[in-house]
Image (cartoon, rainbow, N blue to C red):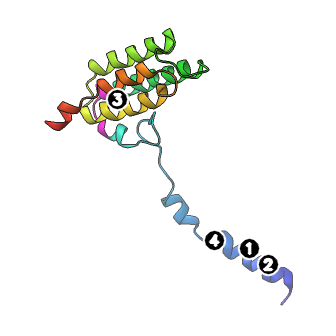
């Protein structure tokens, strides 16, 4: 057999392999974007429009906290005024949030990670506001 013929047959077979399976297994777009792609359970727990809006607002707050923390060059007890404001705003939003306690607790994990290296009191404030009693009695 000629080399060209064998190569043509191999290419034809390879082109036909899995053609329909790829279309059937194509991933679908998620119904709503996850602001925490490494933490998919947050979106799964947010089932109502109000909860999804609160989750998006919390993601915005955590992003603001990350930006404020990145603007400081060293760790301090009090952090910067901007970092304290963004932490307070996040906590205010959590207090009025329709999100259930487990989700709020997990969001506090994300917020604490954002400020831990820049502001000791911000970190402590977040830790003190965990909804542990509500989770325990759930």
Q: Magenta residues?
A: 45-52
Q: Residue at x 42, y 32 (%)?
A: 110
Q: CA distance from mark 3 to mark 4?
A: 43 Å
- View extreme (top): residue: 81
N-terminal of the pair, mark 3 or mark 2, is 2
Q: Indicate the secondary structure of the residue bearing disc 2.
A: helix
Q: Which residue is mark 1?
A: 11
Q: CA distance from mark 1 to mark 4?
A: 9 Å
Q: Quadrant of the N terminus?
A: bottom right
- Residue that label 2 marks: 7
Q: Let me know if residue 50 is in the magenta part.
A: yes
Residue for badge 4: 16
Residues at circles 2 and 1 in contact by the CB criterion of under 8 Å: yes
- State the separation of the CA atoms marked 3 and 2: 54 Å
> Regarding mark 1 in the picture, which secondary structure is present there?
helix
Disc 4 is placed on an element classified as: helix
**Residue 108 position in % (x across, y down):** 36, 29
Mark toward the viewer: 1 or 3: 3
Task: Please state which of the two labelled residues, at mark 3 or mark 2, is closer to the viewer.
Answer: 3
Q: Which numbered disc covers residue 52?
A: 3
Q: Secondary structure at mark 3?
A: helix
């Amino acid at each position: 057999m000629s080399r060209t013929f064998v190569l043509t047959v191999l290419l034809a077979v390879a082109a036909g392999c899995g053609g329909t399976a790829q279309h059937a297994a194509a991933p679908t777009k998620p119904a709503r974007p996850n602001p925490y792609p490494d933490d998919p359970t947050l979106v799964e727990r947010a089932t109502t429009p109000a909860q999804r809006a609160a989750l998006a607002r919390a993601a915005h707050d955590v992003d603001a906290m990350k930006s404020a923390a990145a603007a400081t060059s060293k760790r301090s007890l009090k952090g910067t005024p901007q970092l304290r404001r963004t932490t307070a705003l996040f906590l205010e939003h959590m207090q009025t949030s329709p999100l259930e306690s487990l989700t709020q607790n997990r969001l506090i994990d994300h917020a604490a990670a954002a400020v831990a290296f820049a502001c000791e009191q911000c970190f402590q404030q977040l830790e003190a506001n965990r909804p542990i009693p509500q989770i325990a009695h759930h």
